[in-house]
Image (tube, rainbow, N blue to C red):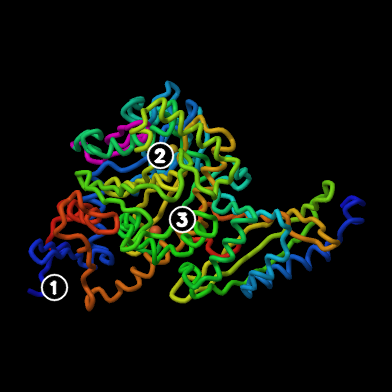
Amino acid sequence: MNEMVAATVSRAEVEDLFYLEADLLDSWRLDDWLQLLTDDAAYYVPPNDKPDADARYTLFTIADDIVRLRERVIRLKDPNCHAEFPLSRTRRMIGNVRIAGVDGEVISAAANFIVHRFRHNDLDRVFVGHYRYKLRRVGGRLKIAERRAILDAQQLGLLGSVSFIL
Amino acid sequence: MNYMPSGHDFVVENPEAKTFFVNREVFVSPDVLEREKRAVFDRCWVYVGHGSELKNPGDFKTRPVAGRPVIFCRDREGTVRALINCCRHRGALVCREREGNARQFYCMYHGWTYHPDGRLKSVPGEDAYGAPLNRDEMGLVPVPRLESYRDFYFANFDRDAVDLQSYLGNVKDYIDLVIDQSPSGKMQIISGTQEYDIRANWKLLVENSVDDYHLISTHSTWLNYMRNSGVNVTPPKGELLPTRGFGKDLGNGHLTTDNPNYRGRPVAKWISVYGEDAKADIDAMRNELVQRLGAARAARVADTNRNLAIFPNLVINDGSSVTVRHFYPVAPDRMHVTAWALGPVEETEAQRARRLHAFLTFYGPGGFATPDDVAALEAAQLGFAAWREVPWSDLSRGMGKAGDQQLATDEGHLRVFWRKWSEMMGTQR
Ligand code: FES
Ligand SMILES: [Fe+2]
């Protein structure tokens, strides 16, 4: 790790942020979760066959700017969001947290995830992959400017929909 | 007269009572599924892929077609092929990659190789055979028939089937409408594949893809999003949808919805979701359409949305964006869906980004609508566990109305699918 990274942010601080985020998402405190994001944040789930692609040229599974992301939260809180009613139970395991680098004010960080998803009348579905984050300080607080959830599965297959926030 | 039918047919139509029922056994029975594979999928033109997916000689994609492993590729001379991905020696998959560019296909089991046009190329230790192997006869087996319409490639496993153009019939007009979005008449499959399973019978997705009756109840959160974004989606008094559209019989089991647009179109109908700065660009695209096609045809292309179902299992939705989606049964209660976005080859970066953004708001496993369709289909499939006690699905909406009066919220176009399905399967249970 280079010294500039160590000077800007510690891994412990990044881990705290990721663990807090996982907890808020698993407990469906989505408005609180939005508070962890910058005002220009983006959320991506690339397609399984093009995990490294750019959403401007490639059809993703999810490519939300902050406007649509806030709308996604409105949708998820609505009982007419049938794919998430009743709400899934999810449990996230976050590991291998690393600071990947710093470019100006942007801190890149990565982590592995396993997300179990349980629903009434449904299979237990396990989402495995890694996150790539861009973080930025806003008023001294570390916030999420971009989160990219990259699945290892070759296709969604029986994972079905990504209707919760991965 | 009883409203409910009796008897042993899969599909029961009663013009006098204005009723149309489908027996739910067709969604749960392994026997029905096996019959469908032979009587429907092996006798119809089934989608393989789009020519734009194979840009260069040697490009290939491997994918199942009607349950068979197939290499969809462009050979050295530029001809598009669909070769069955099964080694002539002892049957191994010859190509095990998802996609790529190949000088040859190499079977890793004993090392036989094949040219990209399928011909056998080399056999290690060939002197052990009684005579040298015939290069043409012992090549990879092509699908029995492969034909294309405007770069959409279809296979048929029935050698005696009618040609693709006759099979598609009126569908061709609706494919042309999609392609007319492109100034050069060239559309391309955009990179990135959405592949997901639905735990429901495949026929439910045919119905769902063209069923506008479910929009208000299943997709209210999408409608809210549109409303929050400044789009008027409030139906006029007495209507179920913001605009009144129709469900059409295109013959041969093919069908479409045909709706006046209210939800915006990347080509070329601006809505507030696209942002103010997109307005001028969309106006320019609209002008290009009018110049090229005339005002009437431009309006036909840019002011209508059409969900097209090509019998048996291909759907082209030209709505918020264009999606090409096909599906095949894995089991009576499970299907595998593959979906792509389609766009004009000459789109600018901004236009392409707008198209993809519009796509993702509605379609696909992370969209604001498709996951709720999946939930609806899975809920139906769970209900079908009681098919013996509650045997009939009701598709009677609009029965008794003339063909040209069938609304997209009626079920007249869904009945088109079922009549063709029933004709091919035989009606007796
Ligand atoms: S099975 Fe392919 S070379 Fe033997
Ligand atoms: Fe739907």
Identify the residue position indicated by label 1 in the image.
B3
Label 1 Cα neighbours within 10 Å, binned few <14 / some 14-19 / many ≥20: few
Task: Indicate the quadrant containing the C terminus of chain B: top left, top right, bottom left or bottom right.
Answer: bottom left
Give the structural element (helix, strand or loop) at label 3.
loop
Mark 2: C-beta under 8 Å from nearest atom of ligand 2: no
Residue A16 falls within the magenta-colored stretch = no
Q: Which mark is residue B302?
A: 2
Left or right position of B90 against A7: left
Q: Which mark is residue B232?
A: 3
On screen, B323 above or below A76?
above
Write the residue at 15% across / 65% down: B19
Give the structural element (helix, strand or loop) at label 1.
loop
Mark 2 and mark 1 lie on one chain; the one further toward the N terminus is 1
Q: What is the three-letter code of the residue carrying label 1?
A: Tyr
User: In the picture, residue B418 is in which quadrant?
Assistant: bottom left
Mark 3 and mark 2 lie on one chain; the one further toward the N terminus is 3
Region in magenta:
B140-160
